[in-house]
Amino acid sequence: GRLVSRYLAARTAGQLKIGVAGRSAARLQSLFAEVEQTAGVRWSPEVLEAPSDDDAALRSLASSTKVVLSTAGPYELCGTPLLRACIAEGTDYVDINGEVPWMRAVAAQYDEAAAAAGVHAVLSCGFSAPSDLGALFAVRALQRKHDARLGVDGHSGAGCVAGSVSKSGGDDDGDGESSYGGGGDSRTFDVASVRALLQFNGRLSGGTMATGLLLDHADARAQAVRREAFALGGAPLHVAGGLRPIDAEPTHAELEQTMGVWAAPFWMSSISSRVVRRSHELFRQAAATDPAAVGYGADFGYREMAFARDETVANAMAREARAHRCGRGRPPHRGRGSVGGDPLHLRRKSSFCCIERTPSTEQRERLIARGRLPAPGQGPSAETRARSFFRTFVLAQGSNGEYAFVTTSGGDPGYEETSKIVAEAALQLASRRHELPLLRRRCGHGGVLTPAYALGMPFIRQLQARGIAFEQHDVDAARLPALVSALAAQRPPHSRCAALAVDV
């Protein structure tokens, strides 16, 4: 919450009316002085007291604004009343949750009501957003590449591809407004799969830690939802007989053949993959009723893993992941090579490859009680955040063998970029809603949505302007492994959290 407030204060510089709500007005007032000092601007937002269990206060809050941005979790405990209030008052909503059982429950209960009201309830505008938006960016890049090969022109619509820097072929000529599609084979071209490898160095927040513990202690029904690959939709239409390899949760180290690098299970993939598949499901639903909508592909598949420097590192990461799933996470330590000696750390190798060291549920609870892991409201220092980064390698492939390779990258993913992404999502809905796709499904224009579906390519352009990179690389298959290795050996440029004010 503090980082989002700081970002908005610097980003808007008094050009947009903003209110801040919470349980205690006194605590919020103390926050403003801190924000003014760190952001370097005068900031006097409206203060609203709205406890998460006060329905009347939440309705009053929602009725007073265009968009509500929520960073208050765990959402299973305090998110539903606020979301319900926003839908009742016709107010858009964004959050940073990563709680798949909660997302499934509110989608089942409120999706149609939100759609009928035209409310954009955009969930998971945090750590999962780069995965979701990266998949969209890669899919649209491949679809446009297919169009270019056939000599098919796009048409104005919602499935647009933002202009980007092509790393081996000059500037992309997309103006950000022409969409994939235009007739003939191109309108029915299906993307078969997207595979993503995440490389990052960062720390978890106390709030994220608390959410993880809550999910670990959830009942058997919630645990079953967490394990379900298509918990939020997106199952293939023409495949029967169980999960395909691309749909199953990774459990072992793998050699990613096309990119030529090793990969390992990644702890966030059980969340991000569900968000990407929900985007696919939403586009598929819209394509059935809205001529402007273009889906990913009838049997689209998505798989996300962690980048590993070599086979040895990948196997070590996979062992840690399997041990954690069985509740046998190794005791954390401050061993050589750890980043800052954090108990829940990412161990850096020579090419910025990260090893996840995840304590078991019981160990995390003890470490939080002893102050060795962050409690809610706590997190890494500004210096640690400044050293953190992420990069995602994303490969989209068609059933005909065509492919597109893109990367996304930025600064600290768990704090700085999460704050930036959710803040920019709220600003997009508040000030530039007319630029958004506004696709229509059977139930209406809104709904319980994802960043890729609700905000689309206009939002990617907005994030590009704020320092988060989305880049398409024109490279042939023979040179792709060398490109991936070269990129992985470089730290990506860090983006700034407190961006200069622009027109809002």
Image: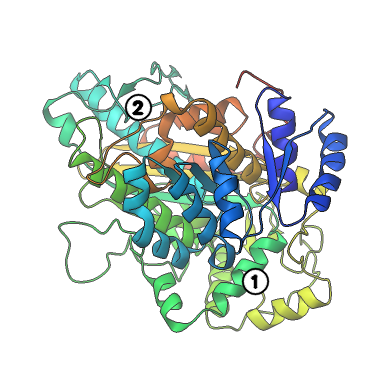
- Colour setting: rainbow
- For the residue pair 63 and 130, the one nearer the viewer reads as 63
Please tell me which residue is depicted at 81% across the width and 33% down the height of the picture: 39
Q: Which residue does the numbered mark 1 point to in the structure image?
A: 358
Q: Where 47 sits versus 427, above or below? A: below
The location of residue 314, given as percent across then percent down, is 54, 64
The location of residue 286, given as percent across then percent down, is 25, 41
- For the residue pair 501 and 307, the one nearer the viewer reads as 501
Q: Quadrant of residue 139?
A: top left
Instruction: Name the residue type under label 2.
Output: Cys
Element carrying mark 1: loop
Q: Where 444 sits versus 226, above or below? A: above
For discs 2 and 1, the disc positioned in front in the rendered view: 2
Please tell me which residue is depicted at 78% across the width and 50% down the height of the picture: 25
Q: Where 231 sits versus 399, above or below? A: below
Please tell me which residue is depicted at 22% across the width and 27% down the height of the picture: 181
Question: With 435 as the anchor, is 61 left or right in this view?
Answer: right
Q: Is residue 324 visible?
A: yes
Cα gap from disc 2 to disc 1, whole angstroms: 39 Å
Q: Residues within 10 Å of mark 2 (few under 14, many from 20)?
A: many
The location of residue 293, given as percent across then percent down, is 25, 34
- Count of residue discs: 2
Q: Quadrant of residue 401?
A: top left
Q: Which residue does the numbered mark 2 point to in the structure image?
A: 160
Instruction: Name the residue type under label 1.
Output: Thr
